[in-house]
Amino acid sequence: MHVTDRLHGDLPERTATDAQQVIADDATLGTSGFGSVGYPKAVPEALADSGRDLDLAVVSGGSVGPEIDAALTDADALERRFPYQSQPELRDAANAGTVHYQDRHVSQVSDDVQYGGLADVETAIVEAVAVGEDWLVPSTSIGHTPALVADAEQVVVEVNRAQPLELQRVHDVYRPGKPPTREPIPLREPSGRMGSPRVEFDADKLAAVVETERPDTPYQFRAPTDTDRTIAVNLARFLESEIDRNPVFESALNLQFGVGSLGNALMSAISEVPVGDRTVTYWGEVIQDGLLDMLDEDVLAAASATSLAFSEDGQERFFADIDDYADDLVVRPADVSNNPTLVDRFGVVAVNSALEVDVYGHVNSTHLNGSRVINGIGGSGDFNRAASVTIVALPSTAKDGEISRVVPMVPHVDHTEHEIDVVITEQGVADVRGTSPRERAETIVEQCAHPDHRPTLSEYLDDAAEETGGHEPHRLDRVFSRTD
Amino acid sequence: MHVTDRLHGDLPERTATDAQQVIADDATLGTSGFGSVGYPKAVPEALADSGRDLDLAVVSGGSVGPEIDAALTDADALERRFPYQSQPELRDAANAGTVHYQDRHVSQVSDDVQYGGLADVETAIVEAVAVGEDWLVPSTSIGHTPALVADAEQVVVEVNRAQPLELQRVHDVYRPGKPPTREPIPLREPSGRMGSPRVEFDADKLAAVVETERPDTPYQFRAPTDTDRTIAVNLARFLESEIDRNPVFESALNLQFGVGSLGNALMSAISEVPVGDRTVTYWGEVIQDGLLDMLDEDVLAAASATSLAFSEDGQERFFADIDDYADDLVVRPADVSNNPTLVDRFGVVAVNSALEVDVYGHVNSTHLNGSRVINGIGGSGDFNRAASVTIVALPSTAKDGEISRVVPMVPHVDHTEHEIDVVITEQGVADVRGTSPRERAETIVEQCAHPDHRPTLSEYLDDAAEETGGHEPHRLDRVFSRTD
């Protein structure tokens, strides 16, 4: 199966400008891309530059780069977008209501497209490292490519020579069956393999192959702050006691970390935990630089995800040593990497960040002031809901301490009190398992809120308990009036 | 394996009054019971009547009867309670903050107890139809009994002669393994079997066997209202078009309905759907009277749940014909009946009710005015999150039309916009798949809100879009001020 050439067989090679012409003005596009890597670049840009009057819907795996979301938004060519975005231009359009954006749990999107009527894909545009007449090998992410290609009427492939052909060694493409006779996913351990590097399709779907040579825009990490480092220390402290206590972690520890600079910084916490002879494996959606360090240092036995979102330095390290890394690193479709059934079976510890958390343990990951979307829920719900231990890690304040990220009630709920086990800030750790809401509120305020904001939160709680009462006391008349 | 006697081997037979003495004053009890049936009655009552100074924690499968929750609350013997309740006395205590109550997703509780540190069970008190030295056969529900018995230091069994011994024919006890090497649950279809009728335990755990003869308190259904019937008609209309369109339902339709009078009324909708030669199966947590009718009429091929919560009439019908029903009816542990991995694989259509829904599709199932808990989330999250199609069905108004159940923002979120596909009221059907929040709001208001309340909701939305803007526009300063 190993291929040494980029192009195989009799292929409809086109320029990007020609290829974009096969796409209808009001098409629904399914694109590769997750963690802002592995997405098609030339054809979407050619669409944006075409001067055509376009009303496109775009479904991707996860976030993609500016060549899709910024270019198509700026060209006024984007009508609808699922399930995640991270480009400022598109974010502004979603917030203005000029692009219809819906953020969905990542794990569900393949099913949503194939069965749920989320979208009827006309053209799948996929970045690949190699292509044949009825197959392709994805580049730096897989995302929902297999489902989007299966659902599409036609497939356009960008073969990107800037992406190493050896990426084929890390890919494991497996397709979950169709309910109601869906078989369990036959993966016995997080580092296992069960598929092939290829996404296959009907040969008559292949409408165009475009050659490109354009690297992914590397991920930009900000340097860890003191707050990040203290959160990591608190996380390490919690994990140390939890793996000692919890029989799920007797011999192995499978971890997921959310995407981003804080997530990347938190990964370093693992190096500080005395894990004994436990096998430590990363089971998440995106592999970032922090994980390369841990693989290099043998802190981590293996890592599995759907995207390789490295910094420039990380890309260089990884591409230079891809053969070695391929032994311990697997890239899967997003409906496998994020599949809650596997998160459950592997007993994953999920560590995700948030915009804010409320005293009763509800979490806002997506909407500032309940109204303005930042990025989207991404895979956080996939992991939070099915994990053995669900941890929310965030700084206790925003805007230089002015605003508390621990609030009476979050104005948008992405994760509920029913699935959050532990809240961690730089102030401390609130293990809220087995607590009533009133106990939980006290613990979260005491352990996790910044001391400057604790009095206001406690006053709110006392007042709510006295004036309203109830299981989860609230003063709805003033719950959102910020007094701090 | 079929047993014809109630008691087997050398058993520590005791009266309930004697049996309660083996329990410590501050014990954590794990009890059988789900859907208010199959729970132990005599020993909890004896505890409540003992005059002892008790501080008990009680973990059950789901809801239990007054002999546990009312009696122990009234005796001031209850300190802590998981994961669900439905007795007025306990509800009042939870709302007063005098009993620490936490409602949890039902599917998680077995894992929470065994691994998650939710509770360390001292004594499991289990109602059975038969018992041996190291096994028991549950009565009308299984709930979390297998996990609670496994976690307990000692086991007290109430053998209830009022429960038919033939219940052994419907039970299928299977134990999911421990993560991270948990095997997939080897169930290939909703009506399949993979276990035995027995819950097994170490013989030295058996502390007492108490004989009783006390029927479960039968479930009281209110007669379906016109509103219930119209919601059922709307549901049938939606299902008819969905099974025609969605490839998941090509040859089979697996359905779950929430517990209660509305849920029971909605089940009748299925009889109105022209399903062709599809196999229709109920995959839920509780089997109620409506399902017996459908089994009798061959509308339903089979039904699977963790509890048999019938009315008095339903109990009589079922107990009289248990041998026949046993061919098509399976009762399982709650971590199997509610397991999201199976809901996913079986492509379940989940139909659950709610207190209220907001214009953006967030759902409140538990807390009136965000503060006062009614019952708990129960299994609704297990099904809603993993279903192929997630439907929330509720009347558009409460209090004789005075209050809208479609609101700008629910003051407590149990299910988020990220998992709700369809909202149904007696007004109509809002299929919100693939919609942006602004589109969703318009559809839900137009299709599902009562005409009397639509103007107020639309004004709110217009005002929020204009004054605040954003992806999900809200006026936090007045979102909870009821102007209707």
Image (cartoon, coloured by chain):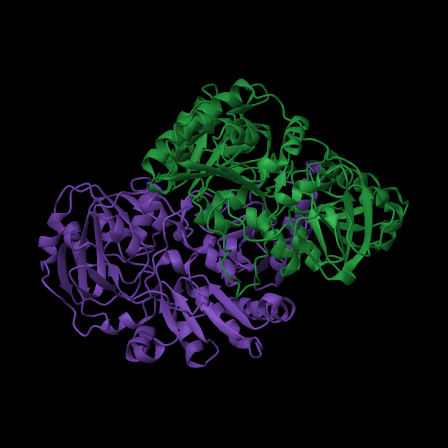
Chain colours: A green, B purple
Is residue A88 or residue B320 the one in the foreground? A88
Quarter holding residue A149: bottom right
Viewer-closest of B115 and A38 = A38
Q: Does the rendering let one see residue A394?
A: no
Residue B395 position, x and y percent, is 53, 60
Q: Please, is residue A158 above or below residue B67 in the view?
A: above
Tell whether B209 sits left or right of A89: left
The x and y percentages for residue A421 are: 42, 38
Does A309 sit left or right of B316 as displayed?
A: right
Toward which corner of the image does residue B275 lie, by quadrant? bottom right
Residue at the (64%, 71%) spot, across then down: B244
Residue B186 visible within the image:
yes
Q: Name the residue at 67% across, 53% down.
A: A199
Residue at image point 24% right, 47% down: B73
At x 76%, y 46%, the residue is A6
Displayed quadrant of residue B34: bottom left
Say left or right for A356 vs A85: left
Residue that protrudes farthest toward the right in the picture: A51
Quarter of the figure with the N terminus of chain B: bottom left
> Percent x, y for residue A323?
61, 37
Q: Position of residue A415 (x, y in %)?
A: 51, 42
